Image: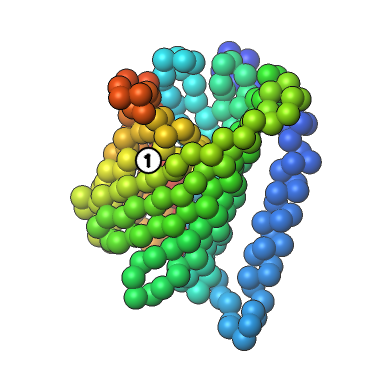
């Protein structure tokens, strides 16, 4: 057990070493398969991504919480993408662990139509709470705007009881106000992100920016306004969060 500032959060890695190793094994196996010639098509790596982020949040349930995360991805033939990441944070003064991995493919070069599938895990070991979410998505991504929609299938277990299954709509809509080689400014409305897939009524409004320092390094900033209760014909401010960090691409 590694303790980092007991007043902030501590990291319990012993419970997750085997799980993370298994997920990394499957991710590396998938990358190895994509690195070979499949059905006569030469598969080449056309892009790589590595990002590090911090996300403090204030909400009406836990008051203040925060997390740090790392995200990595690879693009093949400018058409297929594999991404994954790990996030560690303090929820209810306990360590929360989030993991995600997913893949996406461009279905057509004539229109920006994509299909993707991702898995998310969220766990609170001291509360014996574990949640797994499977999310297939269909997306249209234009340079100026786009939309993603799918079905979130979530399994949650508490204190080693039988998992509870939920199925709900997931959506994301974005609009880029500025989008050029140096700067991207935009708005998005969604109820899921890399490390979270929430209920239909638990959506957020985000204002994001990506500023490219050079060909390889970009600064990422986003402010999220979290909402709750909109399905019941009411919408209440739940909290506010900031996500900032640096992204490397080559």
Q: Residue furthest bottom?
A: 40
Quarter of image, res 73 = bottom right
Q: Does residue 165 sit above or below 144 in this rendering? A: above
Position of residue 149 in the picture relative to residue 237 (left or right):
right
Q: Residue at x 50, y 74 (%)?
A: 77
- Does residue 98 appear in the picture of this structure? no
Q: Nearer the viewer, residue 133 or 74?
A: 133
Q: Does residue 192 sit above or below 27 in this rendering? A: above
Classify mark 1: helix, strand or loop: strand
Q: Nearer the viewer, residue 22 or 145?
A: 145
Residue 151 is situated, as x and y percent measured from the top left of the image, at 49, 46
Position of residue 197 in the picture relative to residue 220 (left or right):
right
How many tags in the picture? Answer: 1
Q: Nearer the viewer, residue 239 or 191?
A: 191
Position of residue 142 in the picture relative to residue 86 (left or right):
left
Residue 153 is situated, as x and y percent measured from the top left of the image, at 57, 42
Q: Residues within 10 Å of mark 1 (few under 14, many from 20)?
A: many
- Does residue 230 appear in the picture of this structure? yes
Residue 144 is situated, as x and y percent measured from the top left of the image, at 25, 57
Where is the N terminus found, in terms of image quarters? Answer: top right
Quarter of image, res 179 = bottom left
Q: Residue at x 30, y 48 (%)?
A: 174
Quarter of image, res 100 = top right
Q: Residue at x 41, y 15 (%)?
A: 60
In this figure, which residue is indicated by the disc labeled 1?
A: 190
Residue 25 is situated, as x and y percent measured from the top left of the image, at 74, 54
Q: Does residue 53 sit above or below 58 in this rendering? A: below
* Colour option used: rainbow
Q: Residue at x 68, y 19 (%)?
A: 127
């Amino acid at each position: 057990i590694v303790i980092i500032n007991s007043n902030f959060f501590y990291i319990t890695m012993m419970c997750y070493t085997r799980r993370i190793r298994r997920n990394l094994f499957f991710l590396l196996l998938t990358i190895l398969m994509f690195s070979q010639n499949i059905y006569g098509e030469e598969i080449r790596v056309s892009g790589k991504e590595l990002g590090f982020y911090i996300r403090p949040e204030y909400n009406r349930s836990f008051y203040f919480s925060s997390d740090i995360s790392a995200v990595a991805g690879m693009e093949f033939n400018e058409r297929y993408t594999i991404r994954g990441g790990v996030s560690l944070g303090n929820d209810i003064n306990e360590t929360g662990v989030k993991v995600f991995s997913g893949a996406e493919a461009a279905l057509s070069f004539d229109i920006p139509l994509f299909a993707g599938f991702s898995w998310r895990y969220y766990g609170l070991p001291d509360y014996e709470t574990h949640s797994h979410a499977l999310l297939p998505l269909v997306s249209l991504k234009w340079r100026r705007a786009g939309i993603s929609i799918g079905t979130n299938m979530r399994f949650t277990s508490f204190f080693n009881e039988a998992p509870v299954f939920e199925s709900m709509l997931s959506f994301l809509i974005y609009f880029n106000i500025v989008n050029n080689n140096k700067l991207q400014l935009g708005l998005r409305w969604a109820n899921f992100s890399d490390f979270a897939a929430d209920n239909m009524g638990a959506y957020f409004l985000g204002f994001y920016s990506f500023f490219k320092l050079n060909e390889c390094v970009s600064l990422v900033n986003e402010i999220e306004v979290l909402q709750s209760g909109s399905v019941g014909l009411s919408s209440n401010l739940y909290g506010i969060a900031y996500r900032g960090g640096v992204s490397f691409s080559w």
